[in-house]
Each structure stands twice: as structure tokens, then as C-alpha cells.
Image: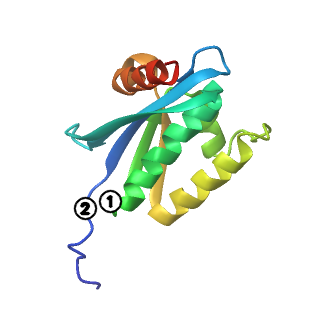
Amino acid sequence: MLPFDHSRPAGKIVAYIDGGARGNPGPAGFGVRVEEADGTLVEEFAESIGVATNNVAEYRALLAALEWAKRHGRDQLHVRSDSLLLVQQMLGNYKVKNAGLQPLHARARVLARDIGTVTFEHVGRSLNAHADRLANTAMDDAGR
């Protein structure tokens, strides 16, 4: 049996992610809220990404959450998103046909594999309100 690695935080974390664009494409941004499994806030952040589509912004949110988990040594991540397309593509149920999304999807797959266990769940907008608020703040910043 391997000794417990105290340098890695134990337990699953949950990332609520959202991205959007005003105009599609238009001023875009994303928001990420990271919580412990019990709902305790760990960190939340947002970023404006210039002009992009809604789907690109959704993937940028996912990549930011995955990079956060990897950077913080977390090996179990549950992603909640209101983007059915992103969730189904990451689960392998939908093909990634859009050439602009293919490299983002490929990078997300690599990061998820590096992390260990990454699961995905589609949630309604009402359950993703914090990430939506953050994404809207980022879109406001992108439009300035």
C-alpha cells in the first residue's frame, strides 16, 4: 500500500464554468467558481478574452478550470456547465466538428487525463448562476 501523499489536497473539487459572447462572435469572457464537494468556496475568477464565440468562451472556461486543478495538485474534478454541447463533446457523445473548437477540445482532453479523474455534468442556468455572473463581468470588461 502506498503512503498517503500529504502534498496533494484530498477530495473532489467542483468547478462551475460558464462562457459567453455578446454578439456571437463578440466581446467574450468566462467565469469559473471552484468549490469543495461540500459547497465551500475555494476560488472564483473571470477573464475577458476579446472577440470570440460563445462556444470558444465555454471551452476557455473549461481550460481555465482544468489548469487551476492541475496547478493546485487536485486529482479529482467534477465540472458543471450549462453548455450541453461542451459536456457532450467532453463525454465523447458528440463529435467536435468546428475547426475552431478542435484544438481547445484536444487541450482539454490532455489536461483532464493529466489531472486523473474528471467528470462532467450538464446543469441548468439557475444552478450555474455564480459562474454566469463572473462570465458576464468578464464580457463587460471585454466590451470596454
The quarter of the rendered structure image containing the N terminus is bottom left
Q: Position of residue 96 (x, y in %)?
A: 75, 41
For the residue labelled by badge 1, is the local secondary structure a helix, a strand or a loop?
A: loop
The single residue placed furthest to the bottom in the displayed view is 1
Q: Position of residue 110 (x, y in %)?
A: 59, 60
Instruction: Give the side of residue 107 with respect to residue 32, left or right.
Output: right
Q: Residues within 10 Å of mark 2 (few under 14, many from 20)?
A: few
Against 69, residue 141 (above or below) is above
Q: Amino acid at mark 1?
A: His
Counting residues from the start of the chain, the first of labels 1 and 2 encountered is 2
- Judged by depth in the image, the label closer to the viewer, 1 or 2, is 1
Q: Which one is nearer the viewer's eye here, 117 or 63?
A: 63
Q: Which one is nearer the viewer's eye here, 59 or 39?
A: 59
Q: Is residue 42 visible?
A: yes
Instruction: Give the side of residue 107 with respect to residue 118, left or right.
Output: right
Instruction: Give the side of residue 11 with respect to residue 58, left or right.
Output: left
Against 84, residue 143 (above or below) is above
Q: CA distance from mark 1 to mark 2?
A: 11 Å
Q: Position of residue 9 (x, y in %)?
A: 24, 62
Circle 2 residue: 10
The single residue placed furthest to the top in the displayed view is 23
Q: Which one is nearer the viewer's eye here, 86 or 137?
A: 137
Task: Report the residue at 41% width, 60% height from top.
Answer: 70
Task: Report the residue at 39% width, 52% height from top.
Answer: 68
What is the number of the mark on residue 72? Answer: 1
Q: Position of residue 117 (x, y in %)?
A: 45, 58
Q: Amino acid at mark 2?
A: Ala
Marks 1/2 in contact by CB < 8 Å: the verdict is: no
Q: Quadrant of residue 125?
A: top left
What is the number of the mark on residue 19? Answer: none
Q: Is residue 18 visible?
A: no
